[in-house]
Amino acid sequence: MPTNVQESRAESVQRRPYKQLFIEVELYKRRDGGYYAWPYIGREQSPGLVKQHFVLSEERFATKEAALKAAFTEGQAKIDAGFDPDKM
């Protein structure tokens, strides 16, 4: 995670199902303005969750909405290409 985020705790976390997996995005406010997204692809598995972080093509977004859209779009593309959170 970049050192230019304001806090080490996410401002918000959103999760959306996609196919048999989910995409989870932690949003952080940047010190220089804008937002940073830290996304994961995961699956629910007894007794909990398995998730793996993936890197976005951009690091800075002007709005929360832009960060979420990029993270969910890139997450869906990775899942469609065969990304498997179990293979770490």
Image (cartoon, rainbow, N blue to C red):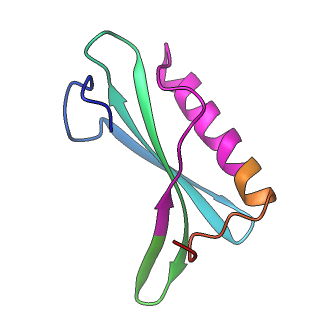
Residue 19 position by quadrant: bottom right
The percent coordinates of residue 57 (x first, y second) are 60, 31
Hey, which residue is sitting farthest top in the picture? 32
Hey, which residue is sitting farthest right in the picture? 80
The percent coordinates of residue 30 (x first, y second) are 31, 20
Span highlighted in magenta in the image: 51-76
Tell me the residue at 70%/72% (across/down): 20
- Foreground of the two, 15 or 37: 37
Q: Is residue 56 magenta?
A: yes
The percent coordinates of residue 46 (x first, y second) are 46, 90
Q: Is residue 78 magenta?
A: no
Tell me the residue at 76%/48% (across/down): 77
Residue 80 position by quadrant: bottom right
Tell me the residue at 55%/34% (across/down): 68
Tell me the residue at 50%/19% (across/down): 61
* Residue 72 located left or right of residue 13: right
Residue 23 position by quadrant: bottom right
Looking at the image, residue 63 lies above or below residue 15: above
* Residue 86 located left or right of residue 34: right
Looking at the image, residue 37 lies above or below residue 58: below
* Residue 19 located left or right of residue 86: right
Hey, which residue is sitting farthest bottom in the picture? 46
For the N terminus, the quadrant is top left
